[in-house]
Image (tube, rainbow, N blue to C red):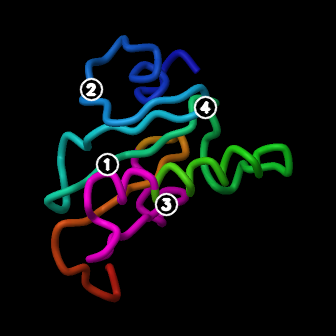
Amino acid sequence: MQECIFCKVIKKEIPSEIVYEDEHILAFKDIKPAAPVHLLIIPKKHITSLSDLHEEDAELMGRIQIASVHLARQMGLAEQGFRVVCNCGHDGGQMVMHIHYHLLAGRQMQWPPG
């Protein structure tokens, strides 16, 4: 995906403040944070959205969940709480067409979100 901004972040063509990286996943700080802590957690494999997941992606998606918890613990957020959000499609609020999760923390989250 030549045009995908997150694929460019993965390839290090666009600078980002990376907080976690392994063979499958990259996590970095959001440039327009919606909370005191706002990370984006993305698979290195380009998948457009939740709607495009297949059975073979199950392990990768599980790795993202585990990475979210690892980051929350590492940053001292797990005890107070945090939110992990994945927007899907235009009406769901997805702005970048590469599946990604927002890890939000550092303040009281509201419900419903919007």
Q: CA distance from mark 2 to mark 1?
A: 11 Å
- Marks 4, 2: nearer the viewer: 4
Q: CA distance from mark 2 to mark 3?
A: 20 Å
Q: Split into 4 quadrants, where in the image is the C terminus?
A: bottom left
The residue drawn where x is 18% and y is 62% is 35
Tag 1 or tag 4, which sits nearer the N-term? Answer: 4
- The label shown at residue 86 is 3
Q: CA distance from mark 4 to mark 1?
A: 16 Å
Mark 4, residue position: 24
Mark 1, residue position: 39
Image position of 96 (left or right of 74): right
Image quadrant of residue 107?
bottom left
Q: Identify the secondary structure beneath mark 3.
A: loop
Tag 2 or tag 4, which sits nearer the N-term? Answer: 2
Answer above or below: position of 36 versus 5.
Answer: below
Circle 3 residues within 10 Å: few <14, some 14–19, many ≥20: some
Image position of 34 (left or right of 100): left
Answer above or below: position of 29 versus 18.
Answer: below
Q: Amino acid at mark 4?
A: His
Q: CA distance from mark 4 to mark 3?
A: 18 Å
The residue drawn where x is 60% and y is 49% is 49
Q: Amino acid at mark 1?
A: Leu
Circle 2 residues within 10 Å: few <14, some 14–19, many ≥20: some
Image position of 6 (left or right of 80): right
Give percent across and percent down for residue 78.
34, 68
Residue range (magenta): 70-95
Give percent across and percent down for residue 90.
48, 57
Image quadrant of residue 113?
bottom left
- Marks 4, 3: nearer the viewer: 4
